[in-house]
Amino acid sequence: MKGIKGAGYPAIVLLAGVISAVVWVIVLDYVYELTPTGLVQALSSGMLGAAGASFGALVLMLVAKPDQRKLDQVAHDARHDALTGLPNRAELFRVLDASIIEANRADMVLGVLFLDLDRFKMINDSMGHEVGDEVLRIVGERLRSTIRNSDVVARLGGDEFVVLCRDLMSPDSVVAMAQQILKRFKEPVALNGQDYRIGTSIGISIAHPGKDRLADDLMRDADAAMYRAKETKSGFAVFDDEHRLQVMDRMDIERDLQHAFDRQELVVYYQPIVDVDARSLYGFEALVRWNHPTKGLLGPGAFMRVAEDAGLMARLGEFVLREACAQAAVWNHISPAAQEVKMSVNLAEQQLVDTSLPRRVADVLSWAGLNPHQLVLEITEDVIVDHLGGLDTLRELRDLGIDLSIDDFGTGQSSLGYVKQFDMVTGLKIDQRFVRDMRSGEADRAIIEAVLAMATALDMRVVAEGVEYEDQLKELQRLGVSLMQGYLFNSPVGADLIDPTIWFPTPTTDPSQLGPEAVGQGFARSGAARAAANVGLAAGGSERLSAP
Ligand code: C2E
Ligand code: MG
Ligand code: MG
């Protein structure tokens, strides 16, 4: 086929021309019994015709050749990613289908490695798309130079890449490849004289010989494993049977969650934030719960990731915001003192990317009749850093008079220096991990001190989360933290368990007289009270309080 494509066409035309010229001359001779001179004339004109035809074919071929090249290019482009030159999704699936059949035939193992870059969004948003594109090109090149000849690396789109490991004897080799890739990613990427650290999380699915697997299933499993690798920050994760059950569970949850809104199964719980120095209630944090018809009361950990993937977080977030604002308005109505109490609501990534968020929040506030100053919106550090484009939205929210707080501070990717950019943020919540580890590690105390120094310099309010023991309370207080939240005071409870006449002091009460007993009574009446209801300030041990 290849030989014919080259100079072969004119040669064939010439040969066909010669043969047809000879046949034509034989026919003429038979019919007209030509003289020898006539025979030579007929033969030479036939030959001339054949030469002319082959010349024409040659010209045609030369004219047509660029078109063929264009066609080849179009076919290549349709199967490759323009930025990195790597096979694209369609080509990957074509190769994967063929590789599954081949691996089965050869009794070999086939591995799918699903890679998603860590912090890519941040680089793209903060450094610009050109830098982002260059990073993707370098990553593609790095992957290409790490894999073996028999492997295939493809780009799915965005910052997602897939490596197909073919012709392997055992699953261990697939894991070894993932480890090798992670090692390569430890090397910084040099761009415009600056070093960037680009991490990646890898999900692995494996097709064992003899077990029929579809390309779609392998990709889905590797994708799910990648999420787990990201969640656990473990670098890579292998999809296994336990994982399969989880995926099925997730599918159930997603289906049920779609109905949960209409069936009014979602509820909001409230957890107090106390001001230990002032011995008063500072505010509440609204935390969503799901009264699942068969699984019972579920915390956000059981369904929030599914809600995110199903694109339901914006709806869920708005529901919680509405509920919390309405609840705060009800308490304000019952006791004017409640107006001094803040209501904190968590903001999800899917809400922050929506530029109409400030208008939506303003609408909810006016619907509930709540002063914006009573509302605090909590955004996790990672979400802010991943969406630096959302800073304008945050600024608009701040302009409405709403307080903004960075949640889970210290767990994300941002450095302390980064926080300077978030000038619209008025507070931060030290992640409970630091508070928990404070008992054992000197290092965590140092981190809290550094965070406090920074917060003071930037005039930010600090709340410590996850305070469970009295010695943590004392230590935090010694470090200068006064606002605290945790099981030591109260777990999150439904609004029906919060008696406003006890929780919110009446206007006649002198606030300076508000001792731990007053707040403690509130906790005690809340139903989820603990022995440390007296804000942990009364004498007492530091025994662990039971979690909800
Ligand atoms: P978060 O915003 O950091 O909320 C604090 C979490 O710590 C809550 O978990 C709370 O129940 C738990 N907690 C409180 N005190 C203690 C303690 O002393 N020890 C320990 N170990 N934990 C304590 P929860 O309710 O399971 O919520 C988990 C996360 O889910 C929240 O973390 C928040 O990021 C998210 N979340 C909850 N509700 C919503 C919501 O309505 N919208 C959004 N976007 N996220 C939400
Ligand atoms: Mg929070
Ligand atoms: Mg938090």
Image (spheres, rainbow, N blue to C red):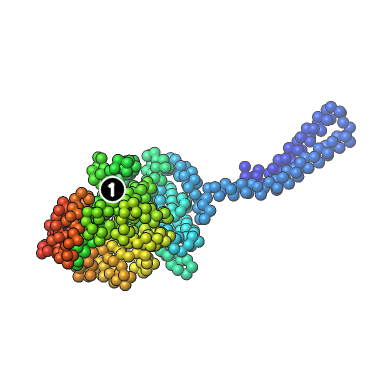
Quarter of the image where one finds residue 340 = bottom left
Determine the image quadrant of residue 416. Answer: bottom left
Secondary structure of the residue carrying numbered label 1: helix
Is ligand 1 less than 8 Å from the beta carbon at label 1? Answer: no
Side of 22 where 443 appears, left or right: left
> From the viewer's perspective, is 3 left or right of 368?
right
Q: Is residue 413 visible?
A: no
Residue 189 visible in image? yes
For label 1, the crowd category at 10 Å Cα-Cα, with few meaning under 14, some 14 to 19 and many 20 or more, is: some
Residue at screen point 37% across, 39% down: 211
Observer-nearest residue: 104 or 38? 104
Q: Where is residue 387 in the image (x, y as percent from the top left)?
A: 40, 59
Which residue ends up furthest to the front in the rendered image? 508
Camera-side residue: 461 or 31? 461
Quadrant where the N terminus lies? top right
For image coordinates 29% across by 57% down, the residue present is: 344
Q: Mark 1 points at which residue?
A: 302
- Of residues 375 and 74, the one drawn nearer to the viewer in this rendering: 375
Q: Name the residue located 47 percent from the left edge and 42 percent from the top edge.
A: 98
User: Label 1 amino acid?
Assistant: Ala
